[in-house]
């Protein structure tokens, strides 16, 4: 299946409702494509309601909190990873720690958050994705359509590891050591 996974806590402040609407529309347009969502971790009641309102409950797997290594396993068994930046003041500088785990998984990353943010710049620099503004329904839908088209050609959408290797713990540690010398 074309499986989009989010790990960690997700609440209404992340404003993924238009993304969920776009996923629902994409499923309507492509009933032959098994487009599914997986949330591993805490999912707020409001987000669960949005899943229901968009008719996505049958296409969504909700997995409660799991140990970290198990969470990483879910990332690796996904097609695309979902990251969301909370819609709060000064969110342009928010860079979730999970972005580095997501990059290490070598999967495309669909981020809902401010365009031009630090997260957006990092994702684009690594060739892993970009941030889609909270109100960019058409852009999100177009991106999902592109992912479906790519998935039809090859269900493996994994990215080359080299695009983000400079952000690995090893590389960052080497850079820190060089600075301290």
Image (spheres, rainbow, N blue to C red):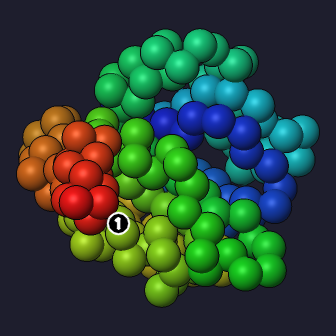
Q: Is residue 154 visible?
A: yes
**Mark 1 lies on residue:** 123
In the rendered view, would you say 112 is above or below 60? below
Q: Residues within 10 Å of mark 1 (few under 14, many from 20)?
A: many
Q: Is residue 52 left or right of residue 82?
A: right
| Residue furthest out toward the right | 45
Q: Is residue 33 visible?
A: no
Percent x, y of residue 82: 50, 49
In what element is the residue under mark 1? helix
Picture quarter with the N terminus: top left
Q: Is residue 159 left or right of residue 65?
A: left
Residue 58 position by quadrant: top right
In the rendered view, would you say 137 is above or below 176? below
The image shows a total of numbered marks equal to: 1
Q: In front: 60, or 175? A: 175
Q: In front: 84, or 104? A: 104
Residue at (85% x, 40% y) in the render: 44
Residue at (76% x, 31% y) in the render: 42
In the rendered view, would you say 147 is above or below 105? below
Percent x, y of residue 128: 28, 59
Residue at (40% x, 18% y) in the render: 73
């Amino acid at each position: 299946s074309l499986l989009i996974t989010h790990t960690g806590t997700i609440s209404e402040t992340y404003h993924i409702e238009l993304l969920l609407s776009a996923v629902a529309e994409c499923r309507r347009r492509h009933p032959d494509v098994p487009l599914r969502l997986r949330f591993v971790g805490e999912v707020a009641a409001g987000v669960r309601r949005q899943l229901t309102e968009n008719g996505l409950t049958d296409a969504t797997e909700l997995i409660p909190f799991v140990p970290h290594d198990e969470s990483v396993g879910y990332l690796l068994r996904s097609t695309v990873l979902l990251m969301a930046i909370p819609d709060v003041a000064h969110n342009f500088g928010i860079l979730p720690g999970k972005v580095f785990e997501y990059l290490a998984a070598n999967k495309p990353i669909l981020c809902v958050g401010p365009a031009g943010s630090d997260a957006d710049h990092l994702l684009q620099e690594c060739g892993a994705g970009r941030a889609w503004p909270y109100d960019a329904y058409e852009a999100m839908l177009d991106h999902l359509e592109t992912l479906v088209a790519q998935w039809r050609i090859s269900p493996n959408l994994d990215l080359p590891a080299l695009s983000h290797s400079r952000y690995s713990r090893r590389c960052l540690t080497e850079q820190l050591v060089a600075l301290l010398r």
